[in-house]
């Protein structure tokens, strides 16, 4: 599942980041690393960016980037 | 003199610390050949004076935008004697990642562990001594906002040493890194990079580090390492685990963090409906405050300068040329003060407040999708909105933007937003004589033109606009001292920059009047004025408007040979007034704005922007001329 398809207020595990993602390095630095648990907090209207909770901090990423991040639901 | 560089991730409190160290005497400078700006100042370390430079915040040494790139470049340069790495103690895990990278630069390094108070509030207790032992770098806990720990920090800077340890990865990982590093060293491919750091970044897939290895003998080792380490993911995960491990060793987390107030604020300010309403209200109040406070102050300043003008006129009545020049100088200074104190100062103060409280990135979240269509990020709304007040602070706020492309687009578009001076023309001419509905129509047309121009510029300009990827800081109360200092730096910039231009401009204009060159100017521009359907006698008005836009209205009736504004409809038709106003809204930014644009994006871009606005204004004037004459009854 792609991050962009995730539900609000749910926790997911980051599985992988697609190749060719310009922001990969930045995502790693923001703590979005495969294996890490993230929570989708809210989406901005009008196809705006997503706000995530990573490691206790809030992180905002654009939709394009979010459609290149693969996630897995936590049972 | 020693040079000390402050480095840290965004929102770690870097500029607060800088202002504690360097104070009001600091100034901002541009990196050579870049639109990115940093601040430098001086501080005493013991008896010795040292230079402190405040580099733009960066998450790591692999950059994502122009500002981060300049920071990394500056760090590589020889000039820096001591690096002070500021960490946000409340987000320690992420912050240490940068520290680990900085250690590999092998320069004297000190860690300033900032926001100790906030960490405690979140229930995180950090043992700085333990952290120091693990990292092998001096760690000084501080609270920059309250000035706590600054003395110890200065002491540590004085005796700063190169890091004792290095980050070590697991044996398997180190094997690949070292193999590539040796190859890079042997072939002298590393350039400014420390070879090991370059090897790591190349394996992680950071373009600028991979590229030099592309056609070299090291290509094979790189491919091998990238394959074995899953495109660097293994390194990233190990480093993350290492940071988590350090955190667990040095910190005790007592109670569950409680962020109730922040959650409530965010649920309103980031709400899909209330978020936009609150944003509107916040900007509206800022405008209201600046305008209602600003206009009387501006009138006061104008009054003072008018008095000076009057007494000069009587004192120098016998020598008209000298009078003309001196009056030009006085008017130029008056114009600068008339912008700087009533508008610039309060405006920049309030914008700095929004920035330091942590509201700006949240606006970015709300508006990103709309602004992205114009090649911009959500935060670019600030230059636009500020533009309705005065273009100068609006242009100066493009400083908060990261990429050059974004800055140029924003500077161009912000200069098209009708400032208060142009509002006088819109209201005083179109509003008063044709009807207020038409004035509002003009604002609508303006917004549409700006959006279309933005979309075109996005396509036209080289470079990509990276998507948003940043962390949203918690809400924080800034200190008045930092805010005032930040505002002061910017106002000082403006004064140094715009005063000479305003003086020069106004001297030229008084000389035009003195030598009666109006006729010649009008003659030269006659064909152009005929093209857009306006009387040639107002060409000179448009020239004066470049000094101050409100002059286009104030001088209009004189230029038309009338005795008062109310007679304008006798000479100009409604169509002409409309076209004239359209032209005035868009054509050439005023001198002070040009100075600000030059400061932010450089001379060449300023020339393009100025030429662009002129072409745009002419095209629009033509379109509306044709349109109005065919539909207006
Ligand atoms: N609680 C707390 N807040 C701080 C401290 N240092 C800075 N701040 C606040 O953090 C916010 C961001 O600081 P700033 O210096 O602008 O961060 P920069 O983006 O790294 O330059 C401001 O509102 C500061 O007042 C500190 O030690 N403790």
Image (cartoon, rainbow, N blue to C red):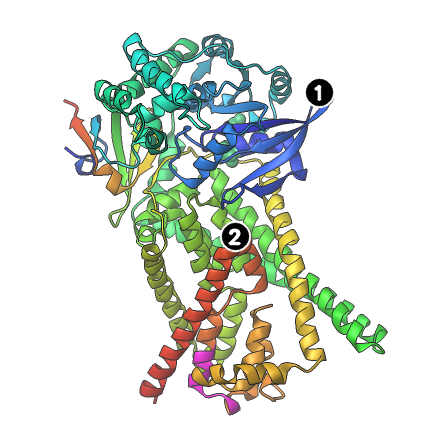
- State the separation of the CA atoms marked 2 and 1: 39 Å
- Secondary element under disc 2, as helix, strand or loop, is loop
The subunit carrying tag 1 is B
Helix, strand or loop: magenta stretch: helix
Q: Residue B455: x and y, percent? A: 32, 58
Mark 2: is the Cβ under 8 angstroms from ligand 1? no
**Where does the magenta region start and end?**
B571-580
**Rendered image quadrant of residue B567:** bottom right
- Given this view, does label 2 or label 1 mark the residue nearer the observer? 2
Image quadrant in which the C terminus of chain B is located: bottom left
Tell which of B337 and B265 is nearer to you: B337
Q: Which residue is at 39% across, 79% downward?
A: B622
Look at the image and tell me whether residue B344 can be seen.
Answer: yes
- Name which of mark 2 and mark 1 comes first in the sequence: 1
Look at the image and tell me whether residue B289 can be seen.
Answer: no
Q: In the rendered image of this protein, does residue B597 appear above or below residue B505?
A: above
Q: Residue B571: x and y, percent? A: 52, 90
Residue picked out by circle 1: B46
Is A39 contained in the magenta span? Answer: no
Q: Which residue is at 38% across, 28% downward?
A: B259
The numbered dot on residue B602 is: 2
Q: Residue B506: x and y, percent? A: 67, 68
């Amino acid at each position: 599942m792609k991050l962009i398809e995730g539900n609000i207020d749910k926790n997911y595990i980051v599985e992988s980041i697609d190749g060719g993602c310009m922001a990969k390095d930045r995502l790693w630095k923001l703590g979005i690393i495969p294996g890490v648990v993230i929570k989708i907090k809210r989406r901005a209207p009008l196809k705006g960016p997503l706000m995530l909770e990573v490691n206790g901090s809030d992180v905002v990423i654009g939709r394009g980037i979010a459609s290149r991040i693969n996630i897995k639901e936590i049972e | 003199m020693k040079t000390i560089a402050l480095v840290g991730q965004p929102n770690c409190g870097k500029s607060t610390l800088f202002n504690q160290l360097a104070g009001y005497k600091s100034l901002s400078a541009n990196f050579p050949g870049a639109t990115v700006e940093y601040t430098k100042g001086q501080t005493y370390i013991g008896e010795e004076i040292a230079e402190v430079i405040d580099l733009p915040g960066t998450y790591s040494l692999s950059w994502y935008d122009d500002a981060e790139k300049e920071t990394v470049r500056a760090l590589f340069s020889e000039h820096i004697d001591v690096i002070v790495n500021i960490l946000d103690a409340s987000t320690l895990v992420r912050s240490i990642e940068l520290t680990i990278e900085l250690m590999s630069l092998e320069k004297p390094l000190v860690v300033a562990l900032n926001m100790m108070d906030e960490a405690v509030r979140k229930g995180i207790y950090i043992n700085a001594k333990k952290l120091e032992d693990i990292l092998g770098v001096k760690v000084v806990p501080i609270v920059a906002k309250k000035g706590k720990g600054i003395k110890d920090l200065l002491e540590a800077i004085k005796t700063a040493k190169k890091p004792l340890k290095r980050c070590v990865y697991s044996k398997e990982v180190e094997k690949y890194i070292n193999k590539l590093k040796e190859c890079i060293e042997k072939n002298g491919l590393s350039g400014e990079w420390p070879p090991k750091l370059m090897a790591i970044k190349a394996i992680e897939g950071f373009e600028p580090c991979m590229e030099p290895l592309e056609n070299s003998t090291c290509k094979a080792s790189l491919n091998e390492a990238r394959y074995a380490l899953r495109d660097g993911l293994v390194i990233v995960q190990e480093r993350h685990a290492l940071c988590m491990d350090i955190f667990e060793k040095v910190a005790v987390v007592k109670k569950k963090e409680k962020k109730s107030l922040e959650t409530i604020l965010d649920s309103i300010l980031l709400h899909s409906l209330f978020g936009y309403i609150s944003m509107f209200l916040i900007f509206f109040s800022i405008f209201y405050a600046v305008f209602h406070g600003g206009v009387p102050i501006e009138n006061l300043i104008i009054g003072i300068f008018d008095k000076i003008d009057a007494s000069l006129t009587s004192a120098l009545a016998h020598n008209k040329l000298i009078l003309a020049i001196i009056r030009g100088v006085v008017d130029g200074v008056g114009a600068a003060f008339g912008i700087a104190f009533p508008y610039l100062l309060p405006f920049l103060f309030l914008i700095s407040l929004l920035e330091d409280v942590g509201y700006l990135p949240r606006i970015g979240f709300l508006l990103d999708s709309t602004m992205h269509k114009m090649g911009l990020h959500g935060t670019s709304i600030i230059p636009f909105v500020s533009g309705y007040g005065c273009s100068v602070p609006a242009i100066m706020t493009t400083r908060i933007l990261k990429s050059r492309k974004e800055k140029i687009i924003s500077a161009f578009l912000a200069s098209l937003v009708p400032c208060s001076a142009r509002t006088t023309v819109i209201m005083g001419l179109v509003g008063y004589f044709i009807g207020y509905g038409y004035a509002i129509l003009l604002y609508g047309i303006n917004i549409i033109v700006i959006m279309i121009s933005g979309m075109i510029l996005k396509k036209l300009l080289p470079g990509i606009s990276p998507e948003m990827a940043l962390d949203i800081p918690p809400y924080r109360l800034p200190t008045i001292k930092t805010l005032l200092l930040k505002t002061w730096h910017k106002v000082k910039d403006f004064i140094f920059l715009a005063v000479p231009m305003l003086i020069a401009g106004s001297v030229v204009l008084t000389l035009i009047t003195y030598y009666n060159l109006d006729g010649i100017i009008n003659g030269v521009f006659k064909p152009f004025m005929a093209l857009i359907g306006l009387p040639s006698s107002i060409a000179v008005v448009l020239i004066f408007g470049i000094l101050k836009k409100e002059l286009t209205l104030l001088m209009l009736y004189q230029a038309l040979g009338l005795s008062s504004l109310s007679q304008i409809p006798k000479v100009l038709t409604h169509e002409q007034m409309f076209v004239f106003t359209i032209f005035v809204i868009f054509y050439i930014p005023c001198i002070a704005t040009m100075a600000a644009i030059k400061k932010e994006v450089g001379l060449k871009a300023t020339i393009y922007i100025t030429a662009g606005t002129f072409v745009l204004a002419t095209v629009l004037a033509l379109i509306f001329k044709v349109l109005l004459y065919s539909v207006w009854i």
